[in-house]
Amino acid sequence: MGIVKALEMDGLDCRMLFKQLGLDYDALEDPDARFPQDSMTRLWQRAVELSGNPAIALNMGKVVRPASFHVVGYALMSSRTLVEGFQRLVRYQRIIAESADLSFRQMEGGYGLVLTVHGDHLPPTRQSAEASLACALAMCNWLTGRTLHPMKVLFQGAEPVDLAPYQQAFPAPLVFGAPYDALIFERSDMEAPLPTANEAMAQLHDRFAGEYLARFSESRVTHQTRQVLCRLLPRGEPKRDVVAQTLHLSQRTLQRRLQEEGTSFQSLLDDTRRELAEQYLAQPALTLLEIAYLLGFADPSNFFRAFRRWFDTTPGEYRARSNGQAGQ
């Protein structure tokens, strides 16, 4: 996966990094695997801490290829123009990432590719958006066989101290503190014929991508279940029948769909509680008792037992150790 190559360019050990964050490194080999946006947020945050490079996400533009996006990349490659390619990208982007919205439209005398990244509980880092913009521009360069110069590039993030990596990645006027993240392109660049265009292949890839998206959209119950669990946990331990009802599924169907995606209701509940426990412990204002109830434990001793099973330590020791590391 591109993100591994991007992080390794700054000397990071990705296998170790994934292990520290509780992420499945081997899932990178599975084109159907997805990481929640909060996991990606924690990954980027840790990568910036370890590398000391806030612009590390821009490395993504140096490693991306159409194959990085599987069938979507090939659909782009066979498009007649970048306009057609980006229209396909918007149509199929959920195959690449569920936590981002893309729109492509005419604007300001050209065309704009506008990106919105959604966090689950944590606000997404600027690195997620910057990686996506760098990938999109690199794809344009790869598909056209030349270096495109956008009319401008918009970033929601504040202007960084070191502009050089941004100027290198985006040969265009840069606007920081913008209302959204976007690449604004010249009309002529977007409407020029692509050397890789192939109408017959485009139709074939459209069919593959459409079938994949339909299967993917139907099956991603894990993500929806996790969101419902997060919403219900502060009211007590969520029951499977209540979650199934919220998702308009029968209990049997919910369990079967989760099983098809390699998990179960109980595993998902346990994983969600573990992830939330880490986030809550990082907030000093929350007491351990409050955290136990926020995680849906009626009896705090059950929270302490579960926490020791997850992290082989107590919540208090974990918090003290985390605070000590943060202060170094």
Image (cartoon, rainbow, N blue to C red):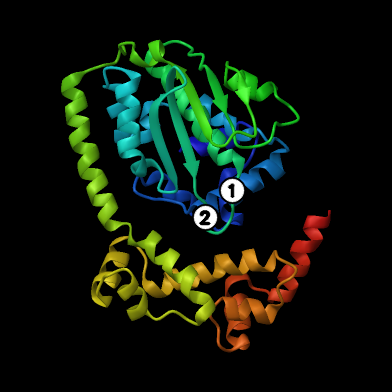
Compared to 37, does 233 lie above or below? below
Disc 2 crowd rating (10 Å Cα; few below 14, some 14-19, many 20+) is some
Compared to 173, does 113 lie above or below? below
Q: Quadrant of the N terminus?
A: top left
Return the residue nearer the eye: 88 or 131. 88
Q: Position of residue 48 (x, y in %)?
A: 67, 41
Res 244 label? none
Q: Count the marks: how many?
A: 2
Q: Secondary structure at mark 1?
A: helix
**Quarter where residue 20 is shown:** bottom right
Res 23 label? 2
Residue at mark 1: 43
Residue at point 78%, 56% (across, down): 326
Q: Would residue 181 appear left or right of 50 to someone viewing this image?
A: left
Q: Would residue 321 appear left or right of 77 to someone viewing this image?
A: right
Q: Which sits earlier in the primary sequence, circle 2 or circle 1?
A: 2
Residue at point 64%, 43% (across, down): 47
Tell me the distance, in whole angstroms, between the alpha carbons under discs 2 and 1.
9 Å
In front: mark 2 or mark 1?
1
Residue farthest along the right direction in this orientation: 328
Residue at point 35%, 20% (across, down): 82
Q: Secondary structure at mark 2?
A: loop
